[in-house]
Image: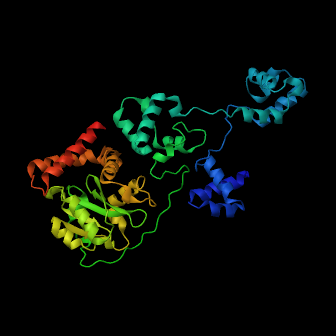
Amino acid sequence: MGFTSEQEDVLWELWAKGEPSRLIARSLRSNPSAVRAHLAKHGGVRPPARRRSGRHLTVEQREEITRGIAAGLSSRAIARSIGCAPSTVSREIARNGGRDAYRATVADRAAWERARRPKASRLESRPALLRIVRARLALDWSPEQIAHWLRRAHPYDPLLRISHETIYRSIYVAGRRELGPGSAKHLRSGRSVRRARVPQRAHGRGVLRDMVSIRDRPAGMSERAEIGHWEGDLVMGARPSAVATLVERSTRFVRVIPLPDGYKAAAVRSAIAADLALLPPALRKSLTWDRGREMAEHQQLSADLGLDVYFCDPRSPWQRGSNENTNRLLRQYLAKGADLRKFSAVDLGDIAERINTRPRRVLGWASSAEKFLPHLHETYSAAPQVLDPARAIDQSAAATSALERR
């Protein structure tokens, strides 16, 4: 089913507001499958309206040509009357049947159809740039990360520049799929149709005893100038599977912790304590968590590691925004419906490495590993008294080796 221009305007306006296809179809008195097919055809991106070039003949000028032919005027005389070159008039008449068959409306319609010339995109016309974007997209970099990395890596080569919006359009827009039909799977969302961003409602998650509020944190922690302050939460899969995530506030370095024994309080406390114990005390100073009941044993965790544990205000997970954002990135690999118990510690480490070695806008397009690992090595040299120094140093060496291989 096709849509009129008025219906298309309504469809795209509602889609930009985040309305689902079901409600859009109801507004158009159409079938939801027709709306979804129309959106999929354009990748969820509204196509730009076609416009006539000011250099081309108008309908009125073509009507003057018709009248001039009927009056027996020459091409030069007709050109003087409509204000254009004689060669323009002679070519216009010749390409539309000659003087005997020329009709203004037919000629105008034919010119509109001939103007449909697909223009080669920036990626299509620059093979070297296309290869680079494909390679970085295969590493699950976002289009924005790719665009800014190109500016840093090739500051003096304007041919290796592209905006993130151009990359998105090459992924989504029909007819501009230079990056391949499966390129959308490397995006965070994995969607093949672009959707509008809509706010999500936050919700509370229970009450714990003897909590220390996030408002009692030292004022210096808010400036993110000191290394060793972490934010944490759970990423849930198919129940009862879950993993714990920790993000260092200053460097955004992420650690993904398996929870093979489930996400009850005792299991979470044990897994987090074992993971953070691999770090020197100078790099595990505090932990900020949401009000989830999985942190019911926070006092024991604090005593085990000697770190302070703080909790967000009710219904305010955004107060630990670094962890919230990182968990959204991890959803590309840890789907909500997946059984996360199938991911081994090595698998989760590989996922964390992908995140930690990407350029990040918040870090001036440096990676988290570039910011965190030097502090880790420096702390080992200055204060090697960790609970398990041999294992920690081995893990640090492995992480450094992996970063150098990349």
Q: Position of residue 68 (x, y in %)?
A: 86, 27
Count of marks overlaid on the render:
0
The structure residue drawn at horizontal position 28% and vertical position 48%, both measured from the top left corner, is: 368
Q: Is residue 106 above or below residue 8?
A: above
Write down the quadrant of residue 35 in the picture: bottom right
* Residue 274 vs residue 177, the one in the foreground: 274
* Residue 372 vs residue 222, the one in the foreground: 372
- 234 left or right of 276 in image: right
**Quadrant of image for the C terminus:** top left
The structure residue drawn at horizontal position 14% and vertical position 58%, both measured from the top left corner, is: 281
- 347 left or right of 112 in image: left
Q: Can residue 217 be seen at all in this image of the molecule?
A: no
Q: Position of residue 304 (x, y in %)?
A: 16, 67
- 1 left or right of 69 in image: left
Q: Position of residue 303 (x, y in %)?
A: 16, 70
Q: Is residue 405 above or below residue 275?
A: above
* Residue 234 vs residue 124, the one in the foreground: 234
Q: Is residue 139 above or below residue 254?
A: above
Write down the quadrant of residue 29 in the picture: bottom right
Q: Can residue 149 be seen at all in this image of the molecule?
A: yes
The structure residue drawn at horizontal position 47% and vertical position 63%, both measured from the top left corner, is: 199
The structure residue drawn at horizontal position 13% and vertical position 58%, both measured from the top left corner, is: 387
* Residue 260 vs residue 47, the one in the foreground: 260
Q: Is residue 311 above or below residue 172?
A: below
Q: Position of residue 396 (x, y in %)?
A: 20, 47
Q: Which color scheme did the rendering employ for the protein?
A: rainbow
